[in-house]
Amino acid sequence: MPAFDALGLRAEILRALNEIGWTEPTPVQAQAIPLLLSTERDVVALAQTGTGKTGAFGLPLLMDIEDGQRGVQALVLAPTRELCVQITGDLEKFSKYLQGVRPVAVYGGANIREQIRAIQRGANIVVATPGRLLDLMGREAVDLSTVHTVVLDEADEMLNMGFQDDLTDILQTTPPEKRTWLFSATMGSEVRHIAKRYMREAEELQVGERNAVASAIQHQYTVVHARDRYAALKRFIDAEPDLFAIVFCRTKHETQELATALIKDGFVADAIHGDLSQAQRDHVMGRYRARTLQLLIATDVAARGIDVNEVTHVIHFDLPGEAESYTHRSGRTARAGRTGVSLSIIGVREMAKVRQLERMLRTHFTYVRVPGGGDIGKAQVVAYMKKLQDVEVDHDALASLLPTAHAELSAFSKEELIERFMSVAFNRLITQFRDLPDLNVDLSRKDHTARVERPSSRERFSTGKQMFINLGSADGFDKGKMLGYVCGVSGVQGDVIGRMLIKDVYSFVDIEPGHFDQVFNSFKGANYKGRKIRVDEAQGAQGGPRGEGHGDRPGGGYRSDGHRGGPKGPRSFDGPRGDFRKREGHSDGKPRFQKRPKR
């Protein structure tokens, strides 16, 4: 692989590349840069996402920008505002020591007057989304008659997003003798059509196999029942303490609901989708790039242009409809020479999709099981021990305690100290995850409908242990707040709490029989905002608490959904968290966001 200084770039550009740590070009850069510098013909370059395409077209582009020449000399079109911002930022870094290079990003969602002023101040490179550029052209705020180079970045995605007519309108206003460089991860019929229509005898450059996925990515899938997808997602996160991931959903609504549920369960997550303002998107992406977010929940469109090299996992909470979308999603990981994992959480009916993706992408998908409690516990323990190895000891703060510690512990050997430390520090953690049910579908059965043996919600609450409490919606309680309150007072985990019926001034809470006494006794003498809490044991299917009638119907019987009157509602995810990490949440594992809106 040649070095950058062997590719014919200017000394000022090489100096900037050296400062940002670019020492060797990627394969697409090594092949594209000499070609783009030497030919006057149009070029179609096919390379996977994350292989350095911005440098491949950006560095040759800067070589042809002439200082002192008025007007826009180069136009870069990209499908999303995130990608526009990323490309513009890279061009600014590359051109740090070049005189007169002024790139400007224009995209929807930002102040158009500010963008117009930036162009009027002498922008000679415009990086734009098609929609906003057409708006500026309609206002006669940008003149493309002086453009000598047009770059279509992520061309396949622009076509998938419906920008074909916009591209036609834009390209018709540029000079016919311009050069056009088309960069794409895939070469579908639409991309081939636009290349044939708008490009002149284009040379084609292909790095890697066409429409293939990056070899540095491990493609995995797991099979669960639809109602367990959320619980399975949490298990995989818990089993990888160093995970730094993008989780993909199909719709904006589902993206936001998944992020909200994860946040309520104590994960550091946020969503990015088309309904966010530009300021909100910038805030979310700033947090993610700074790694103050562990999980970014995204739609396909919103994730375009996310250029974060450290992403360890791409998780497909919903499989995309097209192989090209899967390729683009997976390309968010294994960037800049790193490796990564692309994990699909699928239902039984989606196994055929995985096989189809394998054939189309010419790659192998490895089946993995949802981690069990033992796997998660061990992973958490190992991660904690690594933190112990890396911790910086504050000797001054410990100075007064160390003599006592040495005196108390000097009788133990090193092995005994380790064993006792493990017992004290990790017994609760191991116990917390030990009894988690198996979420994996039993693939050995022909109908694939049965999972490995696990107790159902009906079985766990079959004896009808139900607690009456004199708090309800008039006190500000909904199911989520009630779950958090009961668990906080009693110290039990959220998955021992069953269905809840919240009325105006009282509520009923199903509790696993084995934990009922613990919960019931913890409320003795309790107060809520100065008001004495009264609890009583309801009689399950027999009616209300002893000595009292309750419910909306005479006779106090259960409805088929387990509630005594009132509407049937989804379980909440507002439960408290333990000392270490997340827990499964609720007994049925069914999150609200799995009911997709009709489209």
Image: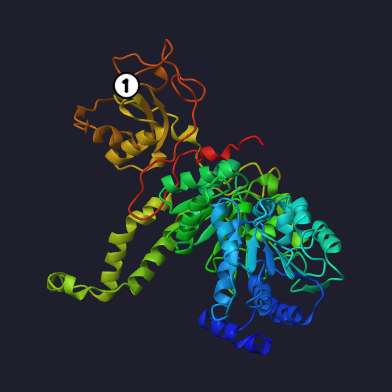
Q: In the rendering, at what x and y percent does residue 357 appear?
A: 73, 57
Please indicate whether residue 417 sits to the left or right of residue 153 in the image. Answer: left
Q: Quadrant of the N terminus?
A: bottom right
Residue 279 seen by the camera:
yes
What coloring was used for the rendering? rainbow
Please indicate whether residue 217 sits to the left or right of residue 374 in the image. Answer: right
Above or below: residue 173 compared with residue 391: above
Above or below: residue 61 compared with residue 370: below
Tell which residue pokes out farthest to the top in this image. 554
* Viewer-nearest residue: 55 or 418: 55
Give the residue at mark 1. 505
| Category of crowding for the residue at label 1, using alpha-carbon neighbours closer than 10 angstroms: few (below 14), some (14–19), many (at least 20) | some
Residue at coordinates 82% horizontally, 59% vertically from top-left? 194
* Viewer-nearest residue: 81 or 220: 81
Query: Residue 471: which quarter of the image?
Result: top left
Q: In the rendering, at what x and y percent does residue 90 appear?
A: 57, 71
Q: In the rendering, at what x and y percent does residue 570 appear?
A: 49, 33
Residue at coordinates 75% horizontally, 57% vertically from top-left? 170
Q: Quadrant of the C terminus?
A: top right
Q: In the rendering, at what x and y percent does residue 232 appear?
A: 53, 50
Number of labels in the image equals: 1
Instruction: Give amino acid for label 1.
Output: Val
Query: Residue 156: which quarter of the image?
Result: bottom right
Residue 437 seen by the camera:
no
Query: Residue 513: which quarter of the image?
Result: top left
Element under disc 1: loop
